[in-house]
Image: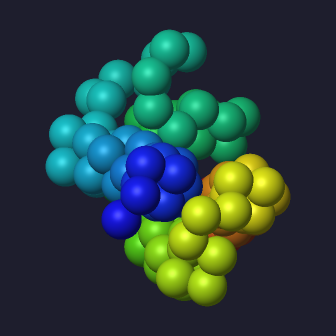
Amino acid sequence: MGTDEFWVLILFLLVGSIYLVCGALLYKAPPGRINHFMGYRTGRSMRDQRSWDFAQKYSGKMMIYAAVVAMAMGISVWMVFPDDALVACIVVIPQTLTIIPVITITESKLKGMQK
């Protein structure tokens, strides 16, 4: 494996790794109190302590799933284009967008819970 191939693989795995670490932290050690600095912070999640606790655990679990998808996406593309830095840069965009379902699904669950 050449140096270019190595850095492309690292780039692909970086997004998923960040999601994995953040998701595991939210799921295993969520922030206990509602705050504006750390955790899954939206208007719905910060409405009350019950919503806050649910949002931290649920979004953490969803981020772990997003991490798996982002890493699988990156590894799959890397196997086809192992040394193409342009492809790597382009693929990081959809990898990053895997966070959108985490937010929309968590917000939907919170909305249903708060009715």
The answer to which of 5 and 40 lies nearer the viewer is 5
Can residue 15 be seen here? The reply is no
* Rendering quarter of residue 29: top left
Q: Is residue 82 left or right of residue 35?
A: right
Residue 43 percent coordinates (x, y): 71, 34
* Pick the front one: 42 or 84: 84
Residue 91 in the image: x percent, y percent? 73, 63
Look at 78% across and 55% down and name the residue there. Answer: 86
Image quadrant holding the N terminus, namely bottom left
Question: From this viewpoint, which residue is outermost toward the left?
Answer: 28
- Give the total number of marks visible in the rendering: 0
Q: How is the image coloured?
A: rainbow
Q: Residue at x 67, y 43 (%)?
A: 44
Q: Quadrant of the C terminus?
A: bottom right
Residue displayed at 58% across by 41% down: 45
From this viewpoint, which residue is outermost toward the front?
Answer: 2
Where is residue 79? Give x, y as percent: 52, 82
**Foreground pick, 10 / 4:** 4
Task: Establish if 31 lies above or below 83.
Answer: above
Q: Is residue 39 visible?
A: yes
Front-lying residue, 32 or 16: 16
Q: Describe residue 40's horizontal placement relative to residue 10 as left or right.
A: right
Horizontal relation, residue 30 to residue 50: left or right: left
Residue name at image x 31 percent, y 46 percent = 21
Instruction: Specify the quadrant of the image occupied by residue 36.
Output: top right
Is 17 situated above or below 9? Answer: above
Percent of width and height locating residue 90: 80, 58
